Amino acid sequence: MTKEDEFHSIAEIDRIIHEPSRLTILAHLYVVESADFLFLMRQTGLTSGNLSSHLSKLEAAGYIEIKKEFVDKKPHTMLSLTDAGRTAFKEYVQSMKHVLDELPE
Amino acid sequence: MTQNIDLKEIEKKVWTSYFEDGIWDIFLGLLILGMGLAPLLEDIGMGLSEYWIISTMLPAMIFLFVGKKYIAIPRMGVVKFGPKRKAKLKKMQAILFIVLILGLIIGILVATSIISPELAKGISIPILVWIGVFIIGFSLAAYLLDFNRLYLYGVLYAIPHPARMMLKHTDFAGISLSIFFVSAAVMVAIGMVLLIRFLRKYPLPEEVSND
């Protein structure tokens, strides 16, 4: 692989996913069918505001679906990966492995 | 395959969080406590019927439902697991259901003298079935669920009834029932420790912004 190819691979890394908090969110949603806001907050250790902000970015990118509903008259938010989000996450993992494998020792 | 290992660990962490609250442990403890209460009622002359057996187990069922709905979910949130875990969960539910129903049927048959609890040539078939059902059932459930405490609970479920049958006609008849309560106490104590730890770790959120 030429240096130009290496730079090209690095440039192709999805910057939306590459942020550590968003990567953690996506990894958690990848292994389940769906989870609510509180569950994700507990599992990722993010604050409510932080999680909310990252979820908005992921939703804008089309990677997650946010379903709002009322349970016992209280607002309840369920989150799940979209097909595009699942594919993007898989591709990100492959890209990272590819980039890291090709790095000189 | 570091990434695969990490995802597996995340999935396992998410899954095991389901048992972190100790509610299942307390439920299983209360259930065997109910199993012990029914023969205790018989011993004090209130008779033994399937109604007693079922009604002494009812509080455990209510605790499981109320505990999950009003203690665990408001603190931990809700998750729907992926298809593989769902399949495992269904298998586990089927196994536990069969185990508990078989245990209940054997208990009723023995209690109502349809099956003789007396030993035949030193071996009692109902007792062997009882031990096998609980050890195998709980071990399978523990394996399928990654819920290792179930191995111990299988043993704690398997011992009390055979011990009661063996001790009933000896000088130790008075303590034959206490084994049920010891088993229950161990499970409830483990569950209570986990529940207290859970409540400290996950206090009720003040107001979760869902935006």
Image (cartoon, grey):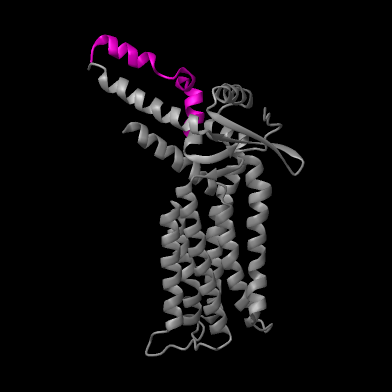
In the image, B48 versus A67, the foreground residue is A67
Q: Residue B203 placed where, x, y %?
A: 65, 37
In the rendered view, would you say B45 is above or below B201? Answer: below
B18 with respect to A71 (left or right):
left
Q: Quadrant of the C terminus of chain B?
A: top right
Kindly indicate the quadrant of the structure image that contains residue B10.
top left
**Residue drawn 71% across the image and 31% down it:** B207
Q: Residue B133 placed where, x, y %?
A: 44, 71
In the rendered view, would you say A30 is above or below B48? Answer: above
Q: Is residue A23 magenta?
A: yes
Kindly indicate the quadrant of the structure image that contains residue B9.
top left
Which residue is situated farthest in the front direction here?
A84
Q: Residue B162 placed where, x, y %?
A: 47, 77
**Residue drawn 55% across the image and 44% down it:** B80
The residue segment tinted magenta is A1-27
Q: Quadrant of the N terminus of chain B?
A: top left
In the rendered view, would you say A58 is above or below B51? Answer: above
Q: Residue B70 placed where, x, y %?
A: 69, 48
In the image, B82 versus B3, the foreground residue is B82
